[in-house]
Image: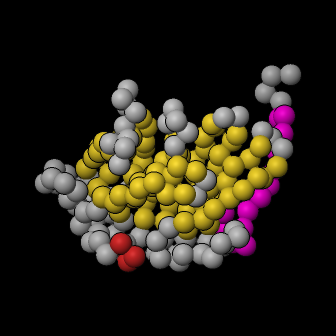
Amino acid sequence: SKGEVVADMVFGSTGINIVTAIAVYDEQVYLGGTTTGMFEEAADGGTDNWISYILPYKEQHEEFQFGSDEGDLLTGLHFDEQGVFYAVTNSGISSFGLSGKSDITIYSFEYFGSTLWQTTISGNGNNPVLASTFDSDGNLIVAGLTDNTIGTNRIGALDSWVAAFDKDG
């Protein structure tokens, strides 16, 4: 009947695991999130991002873990028409050598775990990304809030921001 659970499963790493994004591509379900533990790879530090794909409602198939040496939080997971996928994250700053408390890092993956490109936006304060999507040309659009400056002068105590990323890096 409508609304009935058709499948469920539980999986995770050795620590706390939180799902924060979901996407479907080529009949596979992709989950992404943050963890304090480690899957099969060594943890990068703080909390790390992870992405796992699941064969339709059957079994966890593969996962990988990535991030900076501080706290990371994956907030968006998107696929373009060619199957390239993008992970939108709030990242720690130490391994990137950037200023600010929370920066935005976009990863583009050609294959599961194979990075095509990566870019980071930073400001002088907290700049978390809260939403992301594609525009009609296939470019990634991200938006969030800032308590300081990110590319321009501050207007209020907390300001909204938006940025577009060329799909080709």
Q: Residue at x 28, y 62 (%)?
A: 122
Q: Quadrant of the N terminus?
A: top right
Q: Is residue 87 visible?
A: no
Q: Residue at x 29, y 71 (%)?
A: 98
Front residue (pair 130, 87):
87
The question of residue 13 being in magenta is answered with yes
Relative to 101, is 5 on the left or the right? right
Q: Is residue 27 visible?
A: yes
Relative to 6, is 137 on the left or the right? left
Magenta part, dominant SS:
loop
Q: Residue placed farthest to the left in the image?
A: 153
Instruction: Please state the horizontal and vertical placement of residue 169, each as a whole percent of the image.
Output: 35, 48
Q: Residue placed farthest to the top in the image?
A: 1
The question of residue 19 being in magenta is answered with no
Up-down relation of residue 119 to residue 6 (above or below)? below
Q: Residue at x 68, y 59 (%)?
A: 63
Q: Residue at x 82, y 49 (%)?
A: 59
Instruction: Please state the horizontal and vertical placement of residue 43, each as a whole percent of the image.
Output: 60, 75
Up-down relation of residue 30 to residue 96 (above or below)? above
Q: Quadrant of residue 137?
A: top left
User: Range of the magenta residues?
Assistant: 5-17
Instruction: Please state the horizontal and vertical placement of residue 79, each as a whole percent of the image.
Output: 53, 39
Relative to 109, is 58 on the left or the right? right
Front residue (pair 137, 114):
114
Instruction: Please state the horizontal and vertical placement of residue 143, each as a whole percent of the image.
Output: 35, 45
| Total marks placed | 0
